């Protein structure tokens, strides 16, 4: 069963160290969750996620998995854990975000969303009940409520109506889950999602509604969609102030290493983002000393390790010049090495944050790290 | 220094088991050499080449490495072994084949070949001396003579003139190597290349000329370029009959698992081919029981391991249904898993062939395997 224990709170910020327990094992928070879109973290083997990256939980995308391989195969496989060979915790999103961002044609009604597949144009319908049904079929340990994620910028009235729809849909998600059981013998915890764009009164109202729904954990959606970082921090701060302390807080789709540290200090416990892997494929590499664009000529004869301090053995083994050559030549191995590197760095960063929260010096460490991380090497 | 010891010859065929020794270690023959075009076997980590695939030697392509990263970086790195982090034997081709197959504009003269880069259209010139110079810069343990590889089909007179040019170029390669030394303190063995298209008298003449050049090993080029398999076997047979027994024989660019076994039985010791990795990326998987096209719907809910008998742990860990999903979805991990699988299978196959040659039952084992390998699963 899902359980969250709040272990430490930083004296000089709202940063927290906690522990999530699921039927597939424990997750120490704050945590970053690598995104395994279609049942794979792009370019990374499952054993590398465990041994090199030290991932404690990974994400799957409901929209992608619903379209491919489809739920018949998913159920026959015994769920996503079995299908991909991952025995640690997993989280799935609701499918909503991809419907809004990937599908070219979609129609939102009270009942749900009709959309056409970005793969073959075929029409499909997601409702709160359908999203829950699919997430039952996938079988992640943490599942997300079906929401509407409004674009940025967004009219006040659109944001308000959308938020209220998201709240009504949450009730339907909860009702569906109450009436059904997980398919694979392990429990599934529902996280509802705070919406309200960047309007403070809407965010407050949404946070209160979500808090009152009394779910095992809570998420903040609709951020990192194009708004300035300061808006994101302000909204996160405001929402964290309302969401209950005794439950984990998940900020969806965020962000850069600096975003992670700033939002940890505001009280966020969980993050996911495609940034580390997407940027890796384009040669942008994060280290504790700053970021490197390996496409730059300055790295072409730098035969030092990619990152001598990396927790990933591949980042200590291969050189910057070699990785630059691979990225420059469009070689698969470049994407592989860089993806492992960035994810290992993100996991190192949240683990380090956790250590400093427990040691009581998170706030000063964070200020120092934010300056370092912002450097361009 | 380069050394070849012929250990066993099969009583019922010309199959041989031998041992090549180089300054970077030993190679048991017959051997398959994975192709690391631009300093990387596509989709495969160096540690996977060693631990999963059990590669004893890999190839680099002179043409690709010359264009990217270029010889300045190569020399600064201390050669290709250092640049990519591979401490076992390596072989480079002469660059000629890619000039003919990749460059859209090229002009062959007695002096050499002027060609334009397939990357940026810039003009370059390869001569026998230039190819040797580049291969000195790269520093592989085995380097190839600069030849012209005529297309198939090919006019008799073109093939004859081309072959004679290749022979004259060999002399220039040898002269260049005599006057120069390797850059990195280890020795480099030159293999010359038999040409002559599919004309028996030309192949005989070429084999005699190449044999008389008295190099440490000999190669057969200009095959597997579109001619029927029977032509390839006939030509290989004819050439192997002339090339000296006490030196390794390398059949360039060949081939399917069946091609390997048939040509081993004709006396070939070394192979390279992009087929196992290229086919892997398209979902064609080789096993001892036959080949599978994972794009076929029949595998979509087959949750058995890709190959329970594979020497690669990833092929025993992941399922056919999962690999099919990855290939079908165009995911990098699909190419990675399938590439490791096919290469591990090729290395297993030649190791198995070697075992049967040593046991004296290669010919009967080969006949049985060829039937199995030809099955479509």
Image: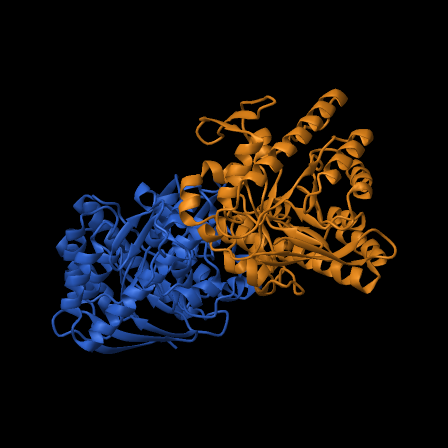
Chain colours: A blue, B orange
Observer-nearest of A311 and B131: B131
Q: Residue at x 16, y 52 (%)?
A: A231
Q: Is residue A139 left or right of residue B215?
A: left
Q: Is residue A171 left or right of residue A129?
A: left
In the image, is residue A132 above or below residue B147? Answer: below
Observer-nearest of B12 and A357: B12
Locate residue B133, reporting x and y percent.
51, 38
- Residue A64 in sight from this viewpoint: no
Rendered image quadrant of residue B98? top right
Q: Residue at x 32, y 52 (%)?
A: A285
- Residue A316 in sight from this viewpoint: yes
Farthest right residue? B12
Position of the N terminus of chain B by quadrant = bottom right
Rendered image quadrant of residue B232? top right
In the image, is residue B164 above or below residue A184? Answer: above
Observer-nearest of B244 and A191: B244
In the image, is residue A321 above or below residue A271? Answer: above
Observer-nearest of B196 and A286: B196
Locate residue A296, reporting x and y percent.
31, 42
Farthest front residue? B179
Q: Residue at x 78, y 55 (%)?
A: B16
Q: Is residue B363 left or right of residue A217?
A: right
Rendered image quadrant of residue A102? top left
Q: Looking at the image, how many numbered discs can be counted on the residues? A: 0
Locate residue A270, reporting x and y percent.
29, 65
Locate residue A152, reporting x and y percent.
23, 45
């Amino acid at each position: 069963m899902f359980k969250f224990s709040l272990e430490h709170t930083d004296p000089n910020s709202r940063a927290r160290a906690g522990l999530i327990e699921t039927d597939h094992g424990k997750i120490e928070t704050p945590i970053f969750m690598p995104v395994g879109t279609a049942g794979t973290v792009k370019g990374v083997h499952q054993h590398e996620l465990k041994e090199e990256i030290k991932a404690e939980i990974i994400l799957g995308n409901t929209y992608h998995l619903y379209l491919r391989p489809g739920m018949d195969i998913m159920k026959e496989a015994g769920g996503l854990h079995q299908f991909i060979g991952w025995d640690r915790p997993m989280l799935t999103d609701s499918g909503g975000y991809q419907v809004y961002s990937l599908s070219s044609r979609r129609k939102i009604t009270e009942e749900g969303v009709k959309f056409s597949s970005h793969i073959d144009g075929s029409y499909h319908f997601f409702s709160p009940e359908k999203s829950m049904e699919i997430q039952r079929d996938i079988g992640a340990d943490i599942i997300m409520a079906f929401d509407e994620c409004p674009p940025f910028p967004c009219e006040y009235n659109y944001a308000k109506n959308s938020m209220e729809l998201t709240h009504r849909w949450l009730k339907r998600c909860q009702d569906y889950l109450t009436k059904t059981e997980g398919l694979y013998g392990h429990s599934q915890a529902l996280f509802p999602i705070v919406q309200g764009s960047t309007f403070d009164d809407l965010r407050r109202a949404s946070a209160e509604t979500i808090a009152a729904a009394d779910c095992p954990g809570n998420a903040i959606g609709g951020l990192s969609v194009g708004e300035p970082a300061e808006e994101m921090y302000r909204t996160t701060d405001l929402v964290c102030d309302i969401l209950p302390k005794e439950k984990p807080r998940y900020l969806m789709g965020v962000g850069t290493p600096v975003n992670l540290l700033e939002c940890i200090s505001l009280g966020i416990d969980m993050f996911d983002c495609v940034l580390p892997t997407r940027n890796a494929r384009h040669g942008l590499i994060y280290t504790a000393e700053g970021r490197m664009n390996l496409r730059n000529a300055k790295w072409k004869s730098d035969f030092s390790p990619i990152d001598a301090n990396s927790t990933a053995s591949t980042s200590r083994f291969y050189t910057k010049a070699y990785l630059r050559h691979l990225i420059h030549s469009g070689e698969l191995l470049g994407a592989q090495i860089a993806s492992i590197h960035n994810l290992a760095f993100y996991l190192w960063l949240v683990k380090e944050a956790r250590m400093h929260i427990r040691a009581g010096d998170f706030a000063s460490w964070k200020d120092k790290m934010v300056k370092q991380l912002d450097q361009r090497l």
